[in-house]
Image (spheres, rainbow, N blue to C red):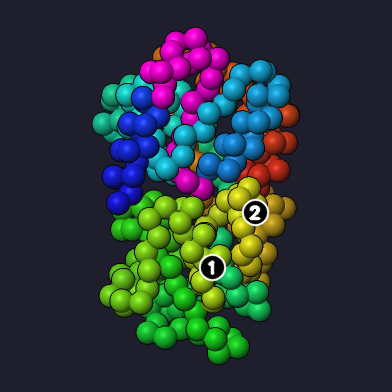
Amino acid sequence: MRMANSSVAIAVFFGCALVAGPSAAAETLRVGGTGSAIGMLQQVGAEFTAATGIKVEVVTSLGSNGAIRALADSMLDIAVPARPLKTDETAAGLRQVAVLRTAYVIATSHFNATGMKSADLAGIFAAERPTWADGTPVRIILRPRSDTDTALLGELFAGMTEAIESARRRAEVPTAATDQDNVALADRTEGSLVGTTMSQIKTEHRNLHVVPLDGVEPTLANFESGVYRFAKHLYFIVPRASSAEAQQFMEFLRSARGVKALRETETLPDAE
């Protein structure tokens, strides 16, 4: 489903770009990528427009793979996937120019939920009938096998790859196709439990409770200092011959105003 949606979004966007014509494209920076980056790109993009006058068009519903394909087809100026480039993508002329990071968190609609130990998370996903400390049901929401967040959960939390596969065998456990579907379903599901990012929760104004892990709140200060250690990375990808607008945007991200705008979205430049 995700790939089909991405293909439709790319086709619609490409058709609009043709109608707009070269003059519109020259004044517009076209960006797209993983769903969890969309709110950040929109908010930081507005600051970039205010500073430069260049319009930023954020194309939604592409996902990581769809955005890279769109960039390779010259339909985007910048792609922002949640994974680094593959060998064949680099060989095709794409290059990584920056990496950002935001806290990866466990969130719920259950506002009485207490903190968890990260080592216990896999057990909660694998359990037949997991419950919160007050006895109410934990309602897990999964992502597709091919999604970058599924792989990320397995990388960050021991035993999660097997636990997720166990959860998939339970008919009552839903799978959210996109990052936006994931948090929207979590918002309206009582006792939900999902993986998401602080950036997405903040920029989309989601009414979700972030669960402390190992006694640590995922505040920006804790994340920046390394006390909170779970992260999702966002990779900024451009073609070999990037547009002038893309170059200006990357320069903006490195400026004091750009870094301030990023921090307001709970996003940081990756540590060198």
Direction from residue 264 to residue 102 in the image, left or right: left
For image coordinates 26% across by 31% down, the residue present is 88
Q: Nearer the viewer, residue 50 or 160?
A: 50
Q: Secondary structure at mark 2?
A: loop
Q: Is residue 182 magenta?
A: no
The numbered disc on residue 188 is: 1
Direction from residue 16 to residue 248 in the image, left or right: right
Q: Is residue 27 magenta?
A: yes
Direction from residue 14 to residue 189 in the image, left or right: right
Q: Earlier in the sequence, mark 1 or mark 2?
A: 1
Distance from Cα at disc 1 to Cα at disc 2: 14 Å
**What residue is pinned by disc 2?**
205
Q: Nearer the viewer, residue 194 or 213?
A: 194
Label 1 neighbour load within 10 Å: few <14, some 14-19, many 20+? few
Residue 261, how many percent across, how many down?
A: 69, 36
The residue segment tinted magenta is 16-36
Viewport quadrant of the C terminus? top right
